[in-house]
Amino acid sequence: MSNALTIAVVQTNLIWENPIKNRRLLNNKINTITSSIDLIILPEMFTSGFTMNASSIAETMDGETIAWLKEKAKEKQAVIIGSLVISENDNYYNRLVCVEPSGEITKYDKRHTFTLAGEHKVYTAGTEKVMFNYKGWKIHPLVCYDLRFPVWARNVENYDLLLYVANWPKPRINAWDALLKARAIENMAYCIGVNRIGLDGNNYEYPGHSAAYDVLGNRIDSIPADKEVIDIVVLEKGVINKYRDKLNFLNDRDNFNLKV
């Protein structure tokens, strides 16, 4: 068990629908991390950008990107997290993977597909809420549009860290900022959101605004809004315990059964 968790937030541009070049780009960025890191977080669809052309860039769980993630996780002795397009059982998924140094993988299929962009017509929505444990931290990973739906993130499992990977566009970035902070406060957990920057192949602009919040909604990172950067954030388990014990807000949460 670790009382602290050190996280590298990778805020970056992505190359449109080009897994090979994106792996090369991200490999170079990850190689610049020289300090000891527990988690490395990449954006949503980090091999392609947010594309509906699933057939052209989809991979399998035995594909090149998963193999590369396993190699980098082992090399850096860190969990690497991000989503990519996966083909499985004749379906496409916007699948988040958490790849541990041991090679173990926790996977989460995006529950809330983005209907405004037609994502629901291309990708099959997930049905399972996922947690994974690493170094004594319970972590709940989610993807982009999931951020708008607080019931799906409701902290009934007493998790410590809520993560969102995203391609969240500039016109609605105020919602991203507000909701990330709200998710931290209402769940009394650390909340980190990692968004890309730059233009995609549809000429949509992404302004970054990656951020990390503590259990009271205080910003604890130093990430510039719209720059390519790797920012290191250190989370302290003692902060969670202190405020949960003192305030006991989670004890008053509503009980309900979630049906999907």
Image: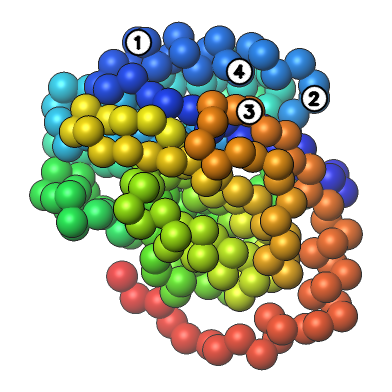
Residue type of the residue flagged with mark 4: Ile
Task: Report helix, strand or loop for mark 2.
Answer: loop
Please state the horizontal and vertical placement of residue 144, each as a whole percent of the image. 40, 51
Q: CA distance from mark 1 to mark 2?
A: 27 Å
**Which residue type does callout 1 highlight?**
Ile
Inspect the image, locate mark 3, and give the three-letter code of the amino acid beneath it.
Answer: Ile
Numbered marks: total:
4
Please determine whether, in this image, residue 43 is positioned above or below residue 254: above
* Residue 165 position (above or below residue 39): below
Of marks 3 and 4, which one's residue comes earlier in the chain? 4
Question: Mark 2 or mark 3, which has the lower sequence index?
Answer: 2
Of mark 1 and mark 2, the one earlier in the sequence is 1
Name the image quarter holding residue 203: top left
- Amino acid type at circle 2 is Ser
- Alpha carbons under labels 3 and 4: distance apart: 9 Å
Q: Residues within 10 Å of mark 2 (few under 14, many from 20)?
A: few
In this rendering, does residue 182 appear at all? yes
- Crowd band around label 3 with a 10 angstrom C-alpha radius: few (<14), some (14–19), many (20+): many
**Badge number at residue 36:** 2
Q: Which residue is mark 3?
A: 230
Q: Secondary structure at mark 4?
A: helix
Q: Give the image location of residue 117, x and y in percent.
A: 17, 49
Check whether the beta carbons of the residues at disc 4 and disc 1 lie within 8 A of each other.
no
Label 4: which residue? 30
Which callout, 2 or 3, points to the residue nearer the camera? 3
Residue on which disc 1 sits: 20
Q: Earlier in the sequence, mark 4 or mark 1?
A: 1
Question: CA separation, marks 4 and 1?
Answer: 15 Å
